[in-house]
Amino acid sequence: MASVALGGVSKRFGDTVAVERVDLEVADGEFLVLLGPSGCGKTTLLRMIAGLEVASDGAILIGDRDVTRVHPADRDVAMVFQSYALYPHMTVHKNLAYGLRRRGMPKREIEERVAETARLLELEPLLARLPAQLSGGQRQRVALGRAIVRDPAVFLLDEPLSNLDAKLRVQTRNELIRLRRRLAVTMIYVTHDQVEAMTMGDRIVVMNGGRVQQVGTPLELFDRPNNRFVATFLGTPQMNEIEGRLSRASRGVEFVAEGIQFELPISAGSEHPRDVLLGIRPHHLWAAPDAVPGRVSLGRGIVEFVEHLGNESFAYLTIGGGQTIAAEVEAGSTLSVGAVLELTTVPERLHFFDLATGGRLDVLQDVGSDNERTPVGAREIHGEGAGSDGDDD
Amino acid sequence: MVAQTSLVSRVALYTLLVVVLGVMLFPFFELAATALRPTADLFAFPPPWLPTRPRFHNFIDVWRIIPLRSYFVNTVEIAGGTMLLNAVAAIPAAYALARFRFPGRQAVLYVVIATQMFAPVVLLIASFRLMSQLGLLNSLWGLILMDAATTVPFTVWMLTGYFAALPREIEEAAILDRVGRWRRLFDLFIPLSMPGIVTALVFTFILAWNEFLFAVTFVTDDSKRPLTAGLYTFVGRFSTQWNYLMAGSAMASIPVLLLFLVIQRRLIAGLTAGAVK
Amino acid sequence: MSSLPTPTTSRRLAELRGVAPFLAPAVVLVGMFMFYPIGMSVWMALNKVDQFGHFSKFVGVGNFTSLFSDGDFRSSIYRTIIWTAAVVVVTTLISLFLAVVLIRRFRFRAVARSLLLLPWATSLVISTLLWQWIANPDFGALNHLLSSIGISHDRIDWLAEPSHSFPLMIGIAIWASIPPTTLMLVAGLQGIDASLYEAGALDGAKGWHTFIDITVPQLRPVLAVTILLNVIFVFNSFPIIWVLTQGGPAGQTDTLVTYLYKQGFQLYQMGSAAAVAIVIFAILLVFSIVHTRLSWRGVLQEKDERLW
Ligand SMILES: Nc1ncnc2c1ncn2[C@@H]1O[C@H](COP(=O)(O)OP(=O)(O)O)[C@@H](O)[C@H]1O
Ligand SMILES: [Mg+2]
């Protein structure tokens, strides 16, 4: 077990910047997920930690040791490749034992470790088979086993579930969570699947365009996305975005967009008025025939269609400006297209982003409490650079 | 209407095919027929198409009349030696070119492609002098070294393609398993590229087996001659006994033909690599 | 935390030291028996050298000037070009036909393709000996065949007259070049995306037009490779001419290759022979540049650097 730290790590391939100035601390025993769309640099970052790619800039520490220029085999890391990369001409047993043999481990100990790993992953009946004779799920387990058997300080996994079918993916995901508890090892796990990230990670690093967008626990990311990219990348259905303008109003601030107007009971900062993007997750926007008292109303919408997901249902409605937004409706409700519903939300669930940069505006930090500092207004956090990256996906 | 024209053209097409193939194969018919002729048939006029009485014993007698045994042994040694030298020289070089990044790599690759075009004849005069200085005239080693040197670039080229095609993650898994470069070559690349390696090496074996220019130039001692040069010198030494020559030629060709059958598919893919996706 | 140093000289040296053992056997072999002879040929070409390899006098470009003033040498160049062009053109045309037929499905297709391996696998020396026997004026099958099918009842002495022997040699070279060419073209044809033909058929392309508009353009890279390989192979071919006529009578069927051989091993003019080698080399270099251009595309080029 070991902690991992990255300082200002970048990777350039010719003119392409695959990873740009990443700072990151992974605690000993932590399960960290690198999440982001395809091509955002996750694999490259992982490969730099493994030592398979040499960082163009920055330093990498494992434990207390600077491993930036250390051979991959001496970093005490194991990697599970997306393609599994099993040795095609070796049996499962040999695949597991090969690395140990090359490390000069005594034969008896190798056998013990292989047997133990095989037991843990239920590979025992498969030990004599070649990779070509295994199913996708079995190959995946062998790839995991090849990493586990080495008992490394850090475990690196690159989209290990992406080649499995949906059912197997869920099953293996749960197995991985169980395994991870048993092994209590530092894991860095790359995925583009937010469900995997949310269910498995102690913390998640959201990446885009080679940069870290935000680091935090799943709930932090969900509740307080740093920028527009993180906000819309996480959560299904995707967060609604409404362009509008925040300005001073009699009882706080007022949000005005085409066909929408509401006030929030907070005091306005000096920077108002300003152009913003309002973000509301469909889960936090309710559509019902009548307004609910105590909630902020966004006005009315006309139902276009309804999506039933079993235990929840979402309606897609056209609002004043002609924009379509998604809102939760009573599960299984039989709404007809064309019905007019009232859209309501609670102020704490609203997100505001700077329209130009995409950075989060903490408009609502004072909701509910009366402000002592004046003027309190929108304070931009993590503005720098984040916005422009957020837009290009 | 349409069906009829296409039937006519099909018949024409296949007739033409049969004619061309007939011309292509006629010499081999003649080879077989001559090899089976009794000596008395040789100078019959007009020459009979088929031997009057096939004499299979020619295939046994020829070993007495031509020193075929020694030719065969020499040829096997030359071709085998060439193949082994190719393996030793080309496999590690191809691995390095396919998998390592080092200064000058592009230049080396360029040279590898360019040298495939250096025909043996260009080397003949100076290498004759070199061989005589090294005392390797009339030595199988001289032929092995020249045959190997002239075939190594092609072998390197073909194997580089094979090695480069192996997924890089498999090699990286081995790097993480603390497997060194030579080990990776022997434990991963060679076993996983066996079909390609066999094809390339067998091809060098065939090329050396069939080589003539160096053989006829560097070797004057009959006991050191390979089959090509030996059979060539048999002509005209006596009033040529063509039936024996053909019997010997047939036997000299059969091993190569069998090897060719085995490797042809991959060989053709290798020859057109880059042009065929 | 410090930032990484950029690749330094010492790092590059380390990389070179790392690959050296892998490249060494090939470099030594090719260096000694290919590059050294080529370099030595250049030096020999500038000197008078006897059959034992002794240098007697530096003559500069003297060997070249006397070569080019030799009418036999000039006609050898001319003949080499005719020889190469005739063989490659006819081979390509016949092979194209064969390849197009051989990718169709028919009974015995596999047999037909395998039979084509026969001439390819057989040593050119043995093939030529065989043809020599076939061309025997009295007892050979060729004259017999010609008279049987009524083309010619003359006793043609194929090898005595250049007007007969040279076309015969061209024929043999074509015969020997067809199999590899055809099989490579078959591979090329099989690589053509079938949907192109379907699209062509929808556009109304038929028969000959399909061939000209779809097949030939798609086949161009493979055609280029086969033509180039054939040019080089035929240009340098030694056994056919040497076995049949040794370039005779009186040098009338010499190509550059047999001319070189005679200069070196019959006239013992090693310097002059080396000069011929340099001329051949210069011509081949042009081809090899073309070849490299064609092959270069296949070279896997990764931009990244690898440390380990
Ligand atoms: N070896 C390489 N050479 C050049 N560009 C590369 C290489 N590896 C990755 N890249 C580029 O770096 C970027 C990040 O790639 P990657 O780390 O594989 O993304 P991800 O794993 O998030 O999908 C991509 O634009 C990719 O094209
Ligand atoms: Mg990836």
Image (cartoon, coloured by chain):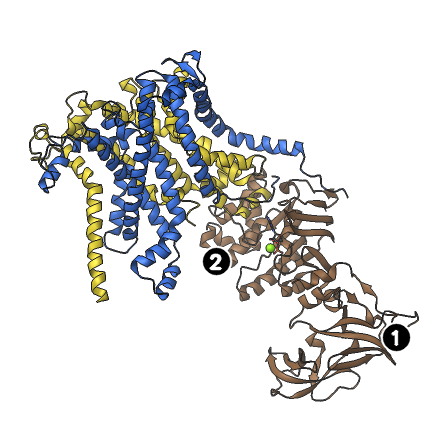
Chain colours: A brown, B yellow, C blue
Q: What residue appears at the point 78 percent right and 82 percent down from the top-left corner? A: A295
Separation of disc 1 and disc 2 at Cα? 61 Å
Work out whether B70 lies above or below C213. Answer: above
Q: As shown in the figure, which amino acid type bears the numbered disc 1?
A: Ser
Dot 1 alpha-carbon crowd within 10 angstroms: few under 14, some 14 to 19, many 20 or more: many
Q: Position of residue A341 (x, y in %)?
A: 68, 86
Location of mark 2 (residue) = A135
Quadrant of the snapshot with the N terminus of chain B: bottom left
Counting residues from the start of the chain, the first of labels 1 and 2 encountered is 2
Q: What residue appears at the point 51 percent right and 44 percent down from the top-left corner? A: C300
Q: Quadrant of residue A133?
A: bottom left
Q: As shown in the figure, which amino acid type bears the numbered disc 2?
A: Ser
Q: What residue appears at the point 50 percent right and 38 percent down from the top-left corner? A: B95
Q: Is residue C8 visible?
A: yes
Work out whether A211 lies above or below B252. Answer: below
Location of mark 1 (residue) = A267
The front one of C264 and A303 is C264
The local secondary structure at tag 2 comes to loop
Instruction: Give the letter of the chain under mark 1.
Output: A
Which quadrant of the frame does ligand 2 lie within?
bottom right
Question: Of tags 1 and 2, which is closer to the observer?
Answer: 1
Q: Does the closest atom of ligand 1 sit within 8 Å of the Cβ of label 1?
A: no
Q: Position of residue B183 (x, y in %)?
A: 53, 37
Q: Is residue B141 visible?
A: no
The front one of B212 and A70 is B212
Dot 2 alpha-carbon crowd within 10 angstroms: few under 14, some 14 to 19, many 20 or more: few
Labels in figure, total: 2
Asked whether the residues under marks 1 and 2 belong to the same chain, the reply is yes
